Image (cartoon, grey):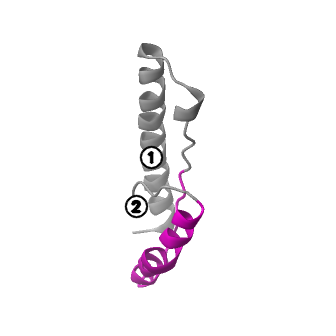
Amino acid sequence: MEINQFKRMNLKMFVAILAMLLTVQIVPAANTAVSSSDIRVFKIRIYYAREGKFSTLEGRFRDHTTKLFAKYGIENIAY
């Protein structure tokens, strides 16, 4: 796959995920009262791995990054 096609595909995926997150955040707020302790911030990070390096990146998250995030109270939702 060409790099430009890959970037376009990731942009479309990012927009779709962002739209879903916004919908999830807006709809419950309209129906129920939200206390200040219920407010969470979501951050989407997109990583690009060179060909053949995905398993290295995945191992880095599995063995190091997720533990570091947990240490500081950051909840990992999905990869």
Q: Residues within 10 Å of mark 1 (few under 14, many from 20)?
A: few
Q: Secondary structure at mark 2?
A: loop
State the count of labels.
Answer: 2
Marks 2 and 1 sit apart, C-alpha to C-alpha, by: 17 Å
Q: Are marks 2 and 1 in contact (CB under 8 Å)?
A: no
- Nearer to the camera, 10 or 41: 41
Can you say whether 29 is above or below 10 in the image? above
Q: Where is residue 11 shown, x and y percent of the image? A: 50, 50
* Residue shown at 45% from the left, 68% from the top: 2
- Nearer to the camera, 7 or 68: 68
Query: Which quarter of the rendering shows the N terminus?
Result: bottom left
Query: Which quarter of the rendering shows the C terminus?
Result: bottom left
Q: Where is residue 24 shown, x and y percent of the image? A: 42, 31
* Residue shown at 41% from the left, 14% from the top: 31
Residue 54 found in image quarter: bottom left
Q: Residues within 10 Å of mark 2 (few under 14, many from 20)?
A: few
| In magenta segment, residue 34 | no
Give the side of residue 21 with respect to residue 69, left or right: left
Q: Where is residue 8 shown, x and y percent of the image? A: 48, 53
Can you say whether 22 is above or below 12 in the image? above
Residue 72 found in image quarter: bottom right
> To which residue does mark 2 refer?
79
User: At label 1, which amino acid type do we have?
Assistant: Lys
Q: Secondary structure at mark 1?
A: helix
State the extent of the magenta-drawn residues as a range.
Answer: 44-72
User: At label 2, which amino acid type do we have?
Assistant: Tyr
Q: Where is residue 4 shown, x and y percent of the image? A: 51, 61
Mark found first going from the N terminus, 2 or 1: 1
> To which residue does mark 1 refer?
12
Can you say whether 67 is above or below 4 in the image? below
* Residue shown at 52% from the left, 33% from the top: 38
